[in-house]
Image (cartoon, rainbow, N blue to C red):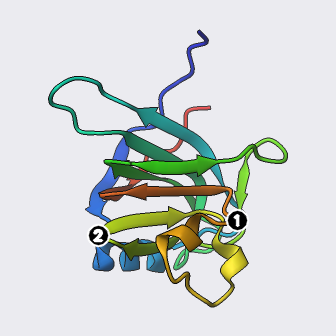
Amino acid sequence: MDSVPPPPARRLGPYELTDSGIAALLARYEFGDGCLRRVVLDQEYGPQTRGRVVRLVIEAARVTDEVLRWEPVCLDLFDVRQFRIDESVGFSWRLFDQPQFTRFDGRLQVDLCAERFGSLSPSSAAEVFEGSELVFEAAGGSWSVLHPWDS
């Protein structure tokens, strides 16, 4: 198995993905032209587990109040029960719009390819997954600012 460097350590955070935490994330960053650099899936097995955990490392989220400054950001999702990751065209998943965060049935949906909705919002969790190529459903999560990559 190839050994790849781990994602950078946290510089700021974690901040919970509550309504106010999501609002702070979306107010701080523009995600257009950013890309998903890494998806880390962690699944524990046994009688007492925390469920599946997913870390999404987003490269180059542009800070909105500082021209041309980019920061790596991660979303840590816990108790992920379903997700969809289709193959990307090219080297990475390019983000055209900001992630869309919705809640249905007490679960958080994070859609990184939500541009198909335009200004509309999905009406159900099933609709979030229909047609999305990069989407996750979790009990909750957090976001953090990371140190820059070494490479």
Label 1 secondary element: loop
Residue type, label 2: Gly
In this picture, residue 4 sits left or right of residue 102 = right
Q: Residue at x 61, y 12 (%)?
A: 2
* Residue assigned mark 1: 131
Q: Is residue 97 visible?
A: yes
Report the quarter where the N terminus lies.
top right
Residue nearest the observer in this picture, 16 or 30: 16
Q: Residue at x 32, y 57 (%)?
A: 141
* Residue assigned mark 2: 106
From the top left corner, tell me how far across and down residue 9 is, in percent.
38, 39
Q: Residue at x 38, y 74 (%)?
A: 103
From the top left corner, tell me how far across and down residue 140 is, in percent.
30, 59
From the top left corner, tell me how far across and down residue 47 is, in percent.
16, 26
Q: In whole angstroms, how far apart are the C-alphas of marks 1 and 2? A: 22 Å
Label 2 secondary element: loop
Residue nearest the observer in this picture, 67 or 100: 100
In this picture, residue 88 sits left or right of residue 83 = right
Query: Is disc 1 surrounded by few (<14), some (14 to 19) or many (20+) residues within 10 Å?
Result: few
In this picture, residue 92 sits left or right of residue 23 = right
Report the quarter where the C terminus lies.
top right
Answer with mark 1 or mark 2, whichever residue precedes in sequence. 2
From the top left corner, tell me how far across and down residue 21 is, in percent.
31, 72
Q: Is residue 78 above or below residue 22?
A: above
